[in-house]
Image (cartoon, rainbow, N blue to C red):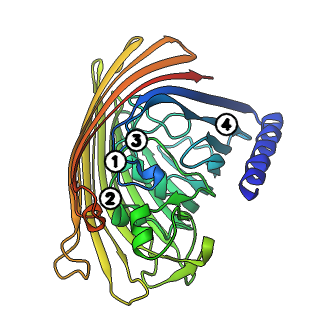
Amino acid sequence: MKNHRLCLIVAVWGVAMRVHAQDFVLHAYADERLVAAPDDTSWTRGGYGKTRYGGNQTQLHFGGAAVYGAAQITPELLALAQLQYQASGHSGFSLLEGWMRYRPVSTTPWRWSVRAGAFFPPVSMENDGVGWTSPWTLSSSAINTWVGEELRAVGGEFVLERRGEINSWDLRASLFRRDDPAGTVLAERGWSIGDLVSGIGSRLREPDAAVRDEGGTPPRYYDPFRTIGASHWGDYVALSWHAPSETRVSLLHYDNHADPGASAPYAGGDEQSAWRTRFWSLGARTDTGAVTWIAQAMDGDTTVEPLEGRYRRTHYRAAFVLVGWNRGAWRPAVRLEHFNTRKPPGDPDGQQGEHGNAVTAALNWRPRDYLRLTAELLHIDSTSTLPVEYGLPGHVVDTQVQLSMRVLY
């Protein structure tokens, strides 16, 4: 109910902003798809499957819907909000982001701005569509699947820009809260590849096998956006360079500064731990004629000190390269990626971890401005020690095929 009230408040606020704004932009989409799913149980159903869908079934699914609204209230003040609806996984209505930005009008090469609210850290190089979706594929990369699930900044951001005739730079620095559980997914179930994005108030499902092993009864969920333990602020700093032909290079460092020894009760009376999560992300994109190139790499670690008092650390890495055709109604794209996690020597849990590779091939067709048809093939080959602990296969090859019809506004 709280989540529905929040969405209603944002919707009313959006209408009010439209009435008073100098300029208002509204976009939306709804997605229906036919999916041929692999055998393994998806992470959305409490399994260790790497894809959004599982169970070896071919059937229709509602892929989701989202609304994006931005109001230029004054020349200096911008308000933005994104809402989504999901019928499975992160079910129901939720707020993806909502923030206000103040940016004074500048007549010099230098410009600054501040924004406050809930927003995505500027990690992604591929997800810039309505509802934090990708214009190239249905499934996001492993990096951006995790970002969409567990990373959200609730706080403020300062931006300093230097605009040149050819090149420009911008420096972003943020202080935020309510992201202490970030890293849980990577440590407890590993990387995954899909297009489910958590909204404020969403709940993520823990692996059923791990819950049973702890003596619990699945399904068990946790809140990915909360502050746990003593008051503190996380931060990120990002430096980006922009050039012609949509060229951009971005370097970011993120640290949620969570207390790895802190925990707090949540649904069912279980304890939810804070995870100290840090990473570096380096991304680049450019156009060479009709071809768009996107590459990104991430390297980091997450640490927790559970109730038994033993630190557990997980190192994680992922990287991908995407190539897409950016002209005309037909837009094919191919993405290659690698991902892995590992425990350091001497970790109480032993030498656990995973490694895997994935290939995503998508063909998009836009016969009308309001219609996008997409066929996507996702193939993942991965090996993990996590499911082996519970008597499940460690080496898994998943292939998922999706046919999507997305109506856009």
Quadrant including the C terminus:
top right
Q: Label 2 vs label 1: CA separation?
A: 9 Å
Q: Label 4 vs label 2: CA separation?
A: 34 Å
Label 3 vs label 4, nearer the camera? 3
Which residue is labeled 4 in the image?
69
Which residue is labeled 1 in the image?
50
Label 1 vs label 3, nearer the camera? 3
Q: Is residue 385 above or below residue 10?
A: below
Q: Label 1 vs label 3: CA separation?
A: 12 Å
* Residues tagged 2 and 1 counted as in contact (Cβ below 8 A): yes
Q: Label 3 vs label 2: CA separation?
A: 19 Å
Which residue is outermost to the bottom? 309
For marks 3 and 4 on the same chain, the one whose residue lies earlier in the sequence: 3
* Residues tagged 1 and 3 counted as in contact (Cβ below 8 A): no
Label 4 vs label 2, nearer the camera? 2
Residue 324 at least partly seen: no
